[in-house]
Structure formats: structure tokens, C-alpha cells
Amino acid sequence: MFVLSTALTTAMTGTITYVAPEKAQAFLVPEVKETLEKKPPMVDEVASNCYLYMKQKFPTLPNTSELKPNTTPRIGVMAIFKSPVYIQHYGKIVGFDAEGFWLEDTNWGGAGYRTHYMKWSNPDIAGFWSP
């Protein structure tokens, strides 16, 4: 985790230390590595609703109307996305490097559970939330 933390810290201070995504995955905790393996999407109510999935991960998650960014990005916090295409989207950060982060979520591009890579430069990132 030290390398990932260092990469993010240096990226946020303007000095970017590049860690290729395939190399950065080696620093993820074992549970996260397992989620990166391809799994067939499950179709259920939670798989079709990113907020319900995050409510399982963060039981104290406030209603969407009350949800405001309150922290900096790190493993274990929730990323908040806003866009003209969708109202809001939520996912849990499970790993990161200098270029972006791995997001565990549901309903990104269709119903299903997935972990995928998002770049820090994504203009739809609205902030980060933690209980």
C-alpha cells in the first residue's frame, strides 16, 4: 500500500510518479484482487442501483439529497460522480495509482457488480465521501 499511497501523494502535489495499472494491482489487498477477476454480472435490485450497493458497504450513508463530499480520496472511501448523462453515481475506491483508481460499484454501463479503473482526470468526479 505504501507505493500506492506515495503515488497518490506525489500526484496530488504535482510530482507524478507513474505506476502502471498492471503493476499497481500487485499492491492491492487480496480481497480486491479477487474482485478484479471477471465474474458474470448478477442481476438483482442492488446490481441495478449503485446507491443501494453503497448503502450495503456504508450503512450510515445519508440520503442522496444530503450526501456531500467530505474527505480526500483513499482506499475504502466512496467516490461521487455527477454528469449530464446520469444524475449521480457512487462507488467504493479499492485501489489506486498515480493515474487513477479502481472503483467497486454496480450499474456502471448496465446492471451488474464490477470493479473497473477510473482516471483521476475524469471530469465527472464530484468528490469523495466517508462515514
Image: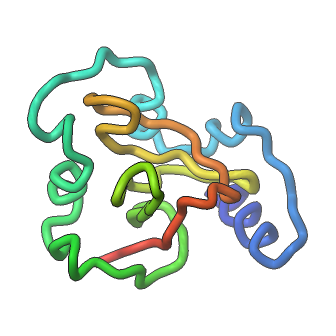
Residue under the point 46% across and 47% down: 103
Residue under the point 45% across and 22% down: 37
Q: Nearer the viewer, residue 20 or 78?
A: 78
On-image quarter of the C terminus? bottom left
On-image quarter of the N terminus? bottom right
Q: Nearer the viewer, residue 25 or 16?
A: 16
**How far from the left and from the top, in percent, is residue 24?**
69, 42
Location of residue 117 (image quadrant): top right
Residue that extends furthest to the front in the rendered view of this protein: 84
Q: How is the image coloured?
A: rainbow
Q: Is residue 120 above or below residue 129?
A: above
Q: Is residue 120 left or right of residue 6?
A: left
Count of numbered labels shown in the rendering = 0
Q: Is residue 14 left or right of residue 127?
A: right
Location of residue 5 (image quadrant): bottom right
Q: Is residue 58 left or right of residue 71?
A: left
Q: Nearer the viewer, residue 7 or 124?
A: 124
Residue under the point 54% across and 63% down: 125
**How far from the left and from the top, in percent, is residue 2?**
67, 61
Q: Is residue 85 above or below residue 108?
A: below
Residue that extends furthest to the top in the rendered view of this protein: 40
**How far from the left and from the top, in percent, is residue 25?**
62, 37
Residue under the point 44% across and 36% down: 115
Residue that extends furthest to the left in the rendered view of this protein: 45
**How far from the left and from the top, in percent, is residue 108?**
38, 38
Q: Nearer the viewer, residue 6 or 126?
A: 126
Location of residue 61 (image quadrant): bottom left
